[in-house]
Image: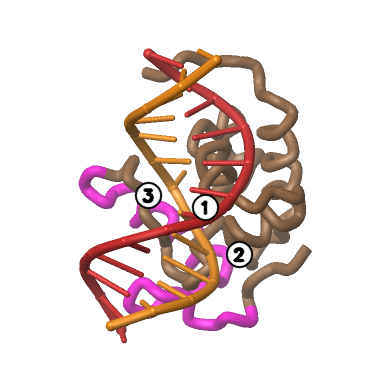
Chain colours: A brown, B orange, C red
Amino acid sequence: MKYERPPTSFEEKVYAATRRIPRGRVSTYRLIGKFIKCASSQAVGQALRRNPFAPQVPCHRVIASSLTIGGFSGARDGVEIKRKLKLLDVEGVQFIKGKLADPNRVHHF
DNA sequence: TGGTTGACAGTCC
DNA sequence: CGGACTGCCAACC
């Protein structure tokens, strides 16, 4: 269990950007990073990894730039990945063979 | 203060 | 298409 800490200003930016993703669409770590002027999408991922606010921050709508689900190393059995695919499917976002079916669904800030 | 880690990304082969 | 390599930035120890 990680130590909980107050969100840093950087993390707040990430969460704010993630919250802007409309329902039924997805975004990438890269776009979020670009939106908050951060060249490291990895840092963005780390911020989302903490995700102190559960569904308030739709982290399941954030995918890799290659339009794949991404690493998600937090999912040892891939359960988390499946959950996100399910959530996205409910929102109308479909994946085929692990890739985003319709690239047009990517939300641009 | 300094080195390692990580929900990533672009390039090269 | 995919694996290896490098760059990137913030959090962690």
Is-magenta flag for residue A82? yes
Chain ID of residue with mark 2 = A
Q: Are marks 2 and 1 in contact (CB under 8 Å)?
A: no
Amino acid identity at mark 2: Val
Q: Residues within 10 Å of mark 3 (few under 14, many from 20)?
A: few
Q: Tell me if label 1 and label 3 are in contact, CB under 8 Å.
A: no
Give the mark toward the camera: 1 or 3.
3
Could you confirm whether marks 3 and 2 are on the same chain?
yes
Crowdedness of circle 1 by 10 Å Cα count: few (<14), some, many (20+)?
A: many
Q: Which residue occupies 44% across, 55% down?
A: A84
| Image spot of residue C10 (x, y percent) | 62, 32
Residue B3 lies, with reference to residue A96, above or below; the image says above
Q: Chain of mark 3?
A: A
Give how far across and how far down residue A49 sits, in percent: 49, 38
Q: What whole-number distance in Å separates the C-alpha atoms at marks 3 and 2? A: 16 Å
Task: Count up the numbered dots.
Answer: 3
Position of A96 with respect to B11 (left or right) is left
Q: Which residue is mark 3?
A: A72
Q: Which residues are magenta?
A: A76-104
Q: Earlier in the sequence, mark 2 or mark 1?
A: 2
The N terminus of chain A, quarter of image: top left
Query: Which image quadrant is residue A9 in?
Result: top right
Callout 3, which amino acid? Phe
Sequence-first disc among 3 and 2 = 2
Figure check: A108 above or below B2: below
Q: Which residue is identified by label 1?
A: A60
Q: Which amino acid, mark 1?
A: His
Query: Label 2, on which residue?
Result: A26
Q: Residue at x 36, y 72 (%)?
A: A98
